[in-house]
Amino acid sequence: MQLPRRFVAPSLLLAAVLIAACGGDDDDSSTTTASAGASVSASASASGTTASGSPVRSPSATSAASSSATTATGSPAASPSASASATPTADASSVFRDLTKDRATETQAVTYDLVLVDDGTTRTGTWRIVQDPPKSLVAFAIDGSDGGTFWIIDDGKSSIICFDTDSEPGQCVKTGDSSLSDSLVPSVVDVDETFDGVENAPNVTEVAGRTIAGRSARCFEYDDTTNADTGTICLDASDGILLALKNEGIELTAIDVSTTVNADAFAPPFAVLDLGG
């Protein structure tokens, strides 16, 4: 679950997409024009508009505004606020499973402040997930020389992977295999691994709830011995949406949550090179 160690440089990611999708055959390559209504900005700073109408901020803006989140280094924060209403439960695993049982079919659009810590270096950014099954979008912006803005759009049949970096500005590649994005994108982008780990962890304890992005959250401390992962995860108390996650190398804190998704939320931000498949 340590994203920095799994982070794929955009040039390598693009090369992997081309090799995996083309298989040496580029006869059917074509270019599709991106929708003018793309919900994520085409700028490198990801300063566009989210599916729920709120801005996706650049890493620098996120860093400046992230005082609302507890940092990965453990410094205190005024918000999200803790609530004394939650009571630790002896059957926390069952509570967690019940909250997350419908996550694969839920409609949601959530933007998070993102903090990464790797070998003493802290990096900031934003991470966004939009889901309206079977369609999904993951977009994240990372600061630093090897950072940038990245989009993974999946309609259940094919994937579109987009980058906007200093070295590779504004490009999207479409493949005919929707599973390709799973093998190329760092696994932390797909929170299923974390959810599965917590559900099956031998040590799960419900702790005091919090208010995050204006929503009531139930929080759990977990020790996933199988994946050597320990941390704290908070879910919306009513629908189980992920509101916060903190472990050794990553911290996510929701800053904008919606259970409705605009029709253009899954439009690619740039022209698309269709590799077929």
Image (cartoon, rainbow, N blue to C red):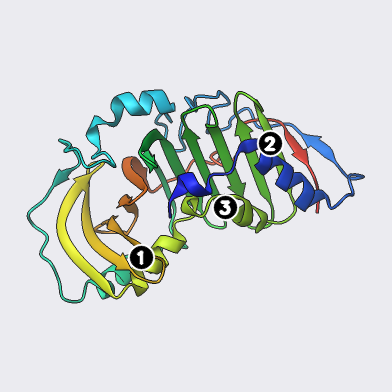
Residue behind mark 3: 135
* Residue located at (75% from left, 53% from top): 176
C-alpha gap between disc 3 and disc 2: 17 Å
Residue 6 in the image, given as x and y percentages of width and height: 52, 49
Q: Is residue 101 above or below residue 217?
A: below
Q: Nearer the viewer, residue 175 or 204?
A: 204
Q: Earlier in the sequence, mark 3 or mark 2?
A: 3
Task: Determine crowd level at label 2: few under 14, some 14-19, many 20+ residues with C-alpha closer than 10 A.
Answer: many
Res. 268 visible in picture = no
* Residue located at (67% from left, 36% from top): 11
Nearest to the eye among marks 3 and 1: give it: 1
Q: Earlier in the sequence, mark 1 or mark 2?
A: 1
| Residue that protrudes farthest toward the left in the picture | 84
The kind of residue tagged 2 is Cys
Residue behind mark 2: 172
Residue behind mark 1: 100
Q: Earlier in the sequence, mark 3 or mark 1?
A: 1
Residues at circles 1 and 2 in contact by the CB criterion of under 8 Å:
no
* Residue located at (56% from left, 37% from top): 150
Label 2 element class: strand
Residue 139 in the image, given as x and y percentages of width and height: 51, 40
Res. 180 visible in picture = yes
The kind of residue tagged 1 is Thr
| Residue that protrudes farthest toward the front in the picture | 119
Label 1 element class: helix
C-alpha gap between disc 3 and disc 1: 19 Å
